[in-house]
Image (spheres, coloured by chain):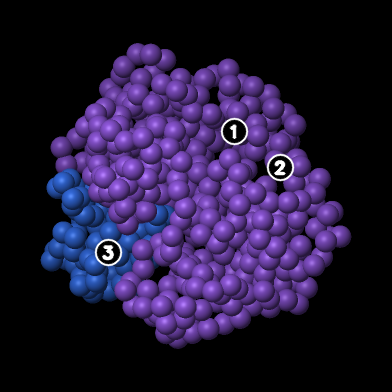
Chain colours: A purple, B blue
Amino acid sequence: MDKNSATSFDVLVVGAGPAGIAAAARAAEYGLRVGVVDDNVAPGGQIWRGSTHEQSTKAKVWSDRLRASGASTLFGMRVFDQPSPNVLLAEQESGVAELHYGKLILATGARERFLPFPGWTLPNVMGAGGLQALVKSGLPIEGKRVVVAGTGPLLLAVAAYLRKKGAKVRMICEQSSWNRLASFGVGLLRFPGKISQAVVLRKDLSGIPIATNSWVVQADGSLKLESVTISRSGKRERVACDYLACGFHLVPNIELPMLLGCEIRDGNVKVDEFQQTSISNMFCAGEPVGIGGVDAALVEGQIAGLAAGGRTKEARSLFSARRKARRFASALERAFRLRAELKQLPTLDTLVCRCEDVAYARLQQHDSWRAAKLHTRCGMGPCQGRVCGPATEFLLNWNPESVRPPVFPVRVESLASTTAIR
Amino acid sequence: MPSQIVLRVNGVRVSVPTGVTVAVATAMAEQACRTSVSGEPRGPLCGMGICFECRVIINGKAHCRSCQIVCEPGMDIRTNG
């Protein structure tokens, strides 16, 4: 697309992960003019990122279906503002695109939750999904010693992937208790598909110690990571490693829905049975309505795409599949809830805001996210609180306030074009 | 397409496989991506363009998220941003 172009769609989908792909494909299959916009260079979102030969069958089926559906794909474009109703602005390498829409489907996905602990800002301390993404984009990991830590089903998948790529996975540290995981495992009996995944995973992980009730309390190294100290069922242990892959499950990306005025309930975008938000021509599907994984995302994306295209009968036929996927989501939530001890991880001088280097002691002098932002610049850097916001929510029970445009940092020229349109 | 491409990280020639991201090239050159406001070296955290810890200067353009940009032959990457 050329500099400052304008395009218009019956249905515009933001996000090309599983939910967005399913939504766009279903809407376009009925002949609507559909566009799907994503800041990555290819479809798949975070879960299906990577080269085609590594893709799961589901990923291949859906990316083929998207291609065949006739939906336009707009990659390398990041939505940052809505200057007037039914228009979004997206920044790309060559300028700003004006995207006009009749119906909008928000499929903005999730990111990892990070919790601060001493040494977490050292190079080579990364998210679990973060290290996996880097390896998928070419980082040589063969022979490297990796500790995988945090919480959530992602840890096992990441450990299995890294090992397949030749990494020496020293240990998996899961903060949740064995009891909680076991009841989650029993719950899996209701989801046969998940069981076969678990069996495969178990084989891929054989020989790697999986420690429950365990978490990293400190990372050490001079210029980059050299070792981590873990708390393993109450005992301290030091493990030498080259990388730490550490993530505490997922947080939904609700910044854009918030900017657009969609009602938020308990940290998720509120939707009705047709995935419609509190704004009548906006729909939302996948992680932003509640962390639920790829199966929930696919079925909700389809419902949103069909409903946006007026196909309510077809949408309704998917309701029972969605109920099943959502039951799995609640089981996930129970199994991997964060334990209170993790609030003791940061010490007074641990940096919580990595953009502005704000230490925990400075945050403790304030009683709200807003006050801390004003006085310490916490959350005011380029990530706009996407990393420290969920951390302070857990540590200090702070709630994020309203979101203002631009929803992502953009070039001055892009902002100038916004003013021209307003 | 050649299997390797050559670029520069902080002035030093580095050869990397075609298709890898700038974050990977920077790691292969054993360089941190940026220096924080209090002087700490930083590298990638989220790997998906959200945390901005992997930002570098590419061909003179500051604040480029290296985890989302694929290497091109002759790129000049600086990590002192």
Find numbered disc 2 in the image and state the secondary structure of the residue it sits on.
helix
Residue A186 vs residue A37, the one in the foreground: A37
Q: In this view, does A295 lie to the left or right of A31?
A: left
Q: Inspect this view and state whether residue A15 appears.
A: no
Residue A130 vs residue A80, the one in the foreground: A80
Q: Position of residue A100 (x, y in %)?
A: 59, 77
Q: Inspect this view and state whether residue A253 appears.
A: yes
What residue is drawn where x is 69% and y is 27%? A187
What residue is drawn where x is 53% and y is 83%? A6
Disc 3 versus disc 2: distance between alpha carbons? 40 Å
The residue where tag 2 is placed is A325
Numbered tag placed on residue A333 in the rendering = 1
* Residue A206 against residue A3 in the figure, above or below: above
Could you tell me the amino acid type at mark 1? Glu
Q: Where is residue A258 in the image (x, y as percent from the top left)?
A: 53, 55
Could you tell me the amino acid type at mark 3? His
What residue is drawn where x is 76% and y is 62%? A307
Find numbered disc 1 in the image and state the secondary structure of the residue it sits on.
helix
Nearest to viewer (mark 2 / mark 1): 1
Do marks 2 and 1 share a chain?
yes
Nearest to viewer (mark 3 / mark 2): 3
Could you tell me the amino acid type at mark 2? Ala
Disc 1 versus disc 3: distance between alpha carbons? 36 Å
What subunit carries mark 1? A
Mark sitting earlier along the chain (2/1): 2
Query: To which quarter of the image does residue A125 belong?
Result: top left
- Local crowd at mark 2 within 10 Å, few (<14), some, or many (≥20)? many
Tag 3 and tag 2, C-beta contact below 8 Å: no
Numbered tag placed on residue A171 in the rendering = none
Residue A7 vs residue A137, the one in the foreground: A7
What residue is drawn where x is 16% and y is 59%? B80
